[in-house]
Image (tube, grey):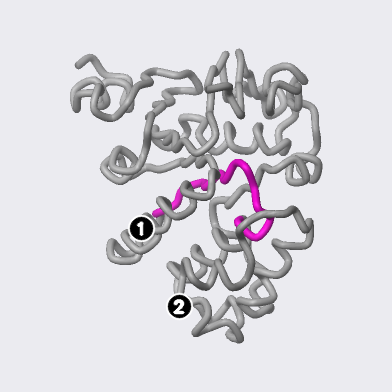
């Protein structure tokens, strides 16, 4: 199957500081790829680079074969890439429904609407008139994912899906992923919880100090190899 997203020799800089070094990664339609790694490994920088928030050369990132590494974030959103940022970044004074409707302003055709997002996360329908600031952390994450889905993306990127959430809430969020994939949406997931990542992903990519230290299907990667790649230690 042809790659939906292809990253080739991606470098990323913040001024004089280099955060990514020659990262390669591919993603096909309907696939879930989990990016794992310790704090400071470059996971969020990778997501921001794909979303056009960190500039790069055009051919470092290709979407459906077209070079997009120098496109701004709003163009990437139009092209079918949605990001759920770390920290959710909701409009806290707006209601759940208003936050979701904002995500649909691009009017890209597809499966996701208020009704289908409420079907995915029923608690959001119950709290549709509540302001985002009144929600629990897990509910805010559901709104952030729902808002991204309202753009009907081909690629859904989620940065730190389970960070700071109770285990029961994390399970509710992860139970939504098969339904998202069933609509053909590819998921690129940044996750510090290795067990959660391994349970949902078709492939796992481990970053260590801005470089790909390990990549493979979960069933092919042993615990010792993952530990070595994650922490940069000898297995």
Q: Is residue 132 above or below residue 53?
A: below
Q: Residues within 10 Å of mark 2 (few under 14, many from 20)?
A: few
Instruction: Work out whether mark 2 precedes mark 1 in sequence or the reverse, and give the earlier one.
Output: 2
Categorize mark 1 by other alpha carbons within 10 Å: few (<14), some (14-19), many (20+).
some
Q: Look at 37% across and 42% down and name the residue there.
A: 192
Residue 176 drawn at (x, y percent): 42, 58
Residue at 75 percent across and 40 percent down: it is 79
Residue 153 forms part of the magenta stretch: yes
- Which region of the structure is painted magenta? 149-162
Q: Quadrant of residue 67?
A: top right
The answer to which of 177 and 228 lies nearer the viewer is 177
What quarter of the picture does the C terminus occupy?
top left
Residue 13 appears left or right of 183: right
List the residue tagged with mark 1: 175
**Do the residues bearing badges 2 and 1 touch, measured as CB atoms within 8 Å?**
no
Locate residue 202, reporting x and y percent.
37, 33
Marks 2 and 1, how far apart at CA:
14 Å
Is 123 magenta? The answer is: no
- Residue 63: x %, y % from top left: 69, 28
Q: Depth check: 76 or 152 in front? A: 152
Q: Which mark is residue 123?
A: 2
**Residue 54 sits above or below residue 233 on the image:** below
Residue for point 58% across, 22% down: 2
- Provide the secondary structure element on which disc 1 rests: helix
């Amino acid at each position: 199957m042809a790659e939906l997203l292809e990253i080739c020799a991606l470098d990323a800089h913040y001024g004089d500081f280099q955060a990514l070094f020659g990262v390669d990664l591919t993603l096909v339609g309907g696939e879930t790829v989990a990016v794992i790694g310790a704090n400071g490994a470059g996971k969020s920088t990778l997501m921001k680079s794909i979303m056009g928030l960190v500039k790069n050369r055009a051919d470092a990132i290709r979407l459906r074969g077209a070079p997009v590494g120098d496109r701004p974030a709003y163009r990437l959103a139009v092209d079918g890439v949605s990001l759920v940022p770390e920290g959710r970044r909701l409009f806290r004074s707006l209601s759940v429904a208003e936050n979701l409707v904002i995500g649909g302003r691009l009017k890209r055709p597809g499966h996701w609407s208020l009704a289908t997002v409420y079907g995915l996360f029923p608690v959001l329908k119950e709290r549709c008139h509540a302001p985002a600031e009144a929600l629990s952390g897990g509910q805010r994450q559901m709104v952030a994912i729902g808002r991204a889905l309202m753009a009907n993306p081909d690629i859904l990127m989620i940065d730190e899906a389970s960070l700071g959430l109770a285990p029961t809430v994390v399970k509710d969020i992860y139970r939504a992923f098969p339904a998202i994939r069933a609509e053909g949406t590819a998921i690129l997931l940044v996750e510090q919880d290795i067990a959660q990542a391994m349970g949902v992903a078709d492939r796992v990519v481990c970053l260590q100090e801005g470089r790909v230290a390990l990549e493979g299907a979960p069933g092919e990667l042993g615990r010792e190899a993952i530990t070595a790649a994650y922490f940069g230690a000898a297995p």
